[in-house]
Image (tube, rainbow, N blue to C red):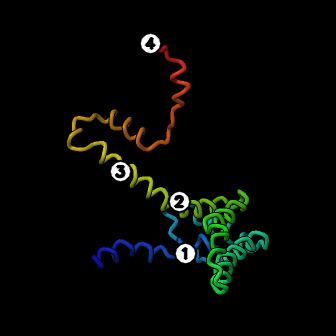
Amino acid sequence: MKDGFAERFEQFKTNKSTLEFIVNPLNTNTNEINIEPFGIDAGSLQMQLLDLKTKDLWSGKFTELKSKLEVQKCMHIAQHKWTALKEIPRVEALIFGAWNSLPECYSEVKKLAYGVLTIFGSTYSCEQAFSSMNIVKSKVRSQLTNKNLESCLKLKTTSYKPDLIKLSNGMQSQ
């Protein structure tokens, strides 16, 4: 079991620089970043990162982000203000706020950041849809056609809520 976990999480070790890029893009070596899954031009990425590092306004956003993430938690823990930890803005909100503040001239850098930030969410969505498909298409329902399976999956994975009152008002009661 231990070997299984080590093998499964080995990819995190090899992509450490890519994952660290999200919080600390200013000190990232672009040669160590895995850009293949995101369809990013390496030359444009390097030029945009160099430009980002030279502009104080934009590089300050990430210096500020890193300090906010580290200092706030340490300060509250040292003062034993455990309830104040809930008042700190969520890490995700701070990270997305920093990346959303960048202008579109850093499109390749933002594309890489958003690609890395959405890895886990999209994996969760895929796993959830696959699990729903396994439930819908069980041995009992083996005669289910692909079209019907697709319809069942759409019903299972969307959050559609019909307006029952409006629908019932349109029906003639007996």
How far is mark 4 from mark 1, CA to CA?
Answer: 73 Å
Query: Does label 4 or label 3 sit earlier along the sequence?
Result: 3
User: At 44% across and 77% down in the image, what residue appears?
Assistant: 13
**Mark 2 secondary-structure assignment:** loop
Query: Does label 1 or label 2 sit earlier along the sequence?
Result: 1
Amino acid type at image mark 1: Asn
Amino acid type at image mark 4: Gln
The reply to whether discs 4 and 3 touch (Cβ–Cβ < 8 Å) is no
The reply to whether discs 1 and 2 touch (Cβ–Cβ < 8 Å) is no
Front residue (pair 136, 83): 83
Query: Does label 4 or label 1 sit earlier along the sequence?
Result: 1
Q: Residues within 10 Å of mark 2 (few under 14, many from 20)?
A: few
Location of residue 126 in the rendering, given as x and y in whole percent from the top left corner = 41, 53
**Mark 4 secondary-structure assignment:** loop
The disc placed on residue 130 is 3
The disc placed on residue 174 is 4
Label 4 or label 1, whichever lies nearer to me, is: 4
Location of residue 96 in the rendering, given as x and y in whole percent from the top left corner = 64, 62
